[in-house]
Image: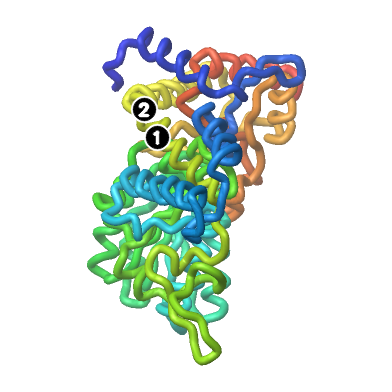
């Protein structure tokens, strides 16, 4: 339970909200209540200004060393890499690979580590609660290699079935790829325990951190995972940008991902050799402004009191659950004991799409549907949910407004 006095926390959050210009607008003539942070978060001025300043000033290509501006751009670009390294507790900046997002990070590992290490009859474990981007790349790989993708079961309350997971562990399991936090349910998976069990089996562990880094501190060394992928745009940074962390020894053994400029050491028609880490995996001109602005997003987060932010999210999800019980007729989907501020629900008797449309008319932005997790919806026997995914800048008053909206939806739809 949070020990921060409510008034202090609320005043802090009101101040933080001022940093996010997009929160202060009207939609359909109503003040925006943005609860679709699982899809993407809004950006603070620090990020918007950083990207704009880059293009107004040092804009140049990196690692070309040709002139003053190129050197400045390279300095900022590599400083951002160190910012990410420190943010997730990686040992070296070489372990931070720039990608376009979580999806690309997972595809990179599937097509490089996977192509090299997965063979006929091998097993890849993913959980039933995964986003499609942590299922499909493995299915493509398995199809190519004659391997198998095997689902780790999920309990009815949305927690990972750790006993079921233990039963699946056997020598054929070469890789476990698992979400840190479920985008549809908010369940926080016990990565540390999973890695411990994986080590006994000598399996590699990849973590889909798309919904993890925005909610709490992540320390990849403490988790001891082998790979960790996340997207900048869900971490208050720009779109089209992401990070893949990998342990140096694994990255060194992996073949390159894409061929092109920057990823080579020497190129000739007699054969080509690869550049050192991390550039081996960064063919072509990278998203320079995106990387630097992601660095700005992390520096912005570092400037905030993350204890207060975490307490805020905690208060919001508890309030949503309490208000759901008070209102009645709401089925909460996902009640894991450890859960991020994701409120997935069904209004009994109403289609989630209709609930979403009615809330939108009241200025409340949520997401409805299968949340790119169709196997999970099939497991739970539902077509989809309505999902209010909250960030630290959401308020208790907004949760109250959400439930006022749901009350209205009830009168309209039921
Ligand atoms: N995994 C999870 C758990 C996600 O929530 C998402 C985005 N919804 C992704 C992967 C894919 O992220 P991106 O589209 O940014 O690559």
Residue at horizontal 52%, vertical 75%?
142
Write down the quadrant of residue 298 in the picture.
top left
Image mark count:
2
**Local secondary structure at mark 1:** helix
Vertical relation: 204 (above or below) 195 = below
Q: Residue at x 70, y 29 (%)?
A: 355
Q: Position of residue 246 (x, y in %)?
A: 36, 61
Spatial CA distance of label 1 from label 2 is 6 Å
Residue at mark 1? 299
Q: Quadrant of the C terminus?
A: top right
Q: Secondary structure at mark 2?
A: helix
What residue is shown at x 39% (from left), y 34% (from top)? 299
- Please report contact status of discs 1 and 2: CB closer than 8 Å, yes or no: yes
Taking depth in this image into account, of 350 and 87 the one nearest to the observer is 87
Please identify the residue farthest to the top as the structure is shown.
7
Within 10 angstroms of label 1, few (less than 14), some, or many (20 or more) residues?
some
Residue 1 horizontal side relative to residue 257, left or right: left
The numbered disc on residue 303 is 2
Q: Is residue 265 left or right of residue 139?
A: left
Identify the residue shown where x is 35% and y is 72%.
252
């Amino acid at each position: 339970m949070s020990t921060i006095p409510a008034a202090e926390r609320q005043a802090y959050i009101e101040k933080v909200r001022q940093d996010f210009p997009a929160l202060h607008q009207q939609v359909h003539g109503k003040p925006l209540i943005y609860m679709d942070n699982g899809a993407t978060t809004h950006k603070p001025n620090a990020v918007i200004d950083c990207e704009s300043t880059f293009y107004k000033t040092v804009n140049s290509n990196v690692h070309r060393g040709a002139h003053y501006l190129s050197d400045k751009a390279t300095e900022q670009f590599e400083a951002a890499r160190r910012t990410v390294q420190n943010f997730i507790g990686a040992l070296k900046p070489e372990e931070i690979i720039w990608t376009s997002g979580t999806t690309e990070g997972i595809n990179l590992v599937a097509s490089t580590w996977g192509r090299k290490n997965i063979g006929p009859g091998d097993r890849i474990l993913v959980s039933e609660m995964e986003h499609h981007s942590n299922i499909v790349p493995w299915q493509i790989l398995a199809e190519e290699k004659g391997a198998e993708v095997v689902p780790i079961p999920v309990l009815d309350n949305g927690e990972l079935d750790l006993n079921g997971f233990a039963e699946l562990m056997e020598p054929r399991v070469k890789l476990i790829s698992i979400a840190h936090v479920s985008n549809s349910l908010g369940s926080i998976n016990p990565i540390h325990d999973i890695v411990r069990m994986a080590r006994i089996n000598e399996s590699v562990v990849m973590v889909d951190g798309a919904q993890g880094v925005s909610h709490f501190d992540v320390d990849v060394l403490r988790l001891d995972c082998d790979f960790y992928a996340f997207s900048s745009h869900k971490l208050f940074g720009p779109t089209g940008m992401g990070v893949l962390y990998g342990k140096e020894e694994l990255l060194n053994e992996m073949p390159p991902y894409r061929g092109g400029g920057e990823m080579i050491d020497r190129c000739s028609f007699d054969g080509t050799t690869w550049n050192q880490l991390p550039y081996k995996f960064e063919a072509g001109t990278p998203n320079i402004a995106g990387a630097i602005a992601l660095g700005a997003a992390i520096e912005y987060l570092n400037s905030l009191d993350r204890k207060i932010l975490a307490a805020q999210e905690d208060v919001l999800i508890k309030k949503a659950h309490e208000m759901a019980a008070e209102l009645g007729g709401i089925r909460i989907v996902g009640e894991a004991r450890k859960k991020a501020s994701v409120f997935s629900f069904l209004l009994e008797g109403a289609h989630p799409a209709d609930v979403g449309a009615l809330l939108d008319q009241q200025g409340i932005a949520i997401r409805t549907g299968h949340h790119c997790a169709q196997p999970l919806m099939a497991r739970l026997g539902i077509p989809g949910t309505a999902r209010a995914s909250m960030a630290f800048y959401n308020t208790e008053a907004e949760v109250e407004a959400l439930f006022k909206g749901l009350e209205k939806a009830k009168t309209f739809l039921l």
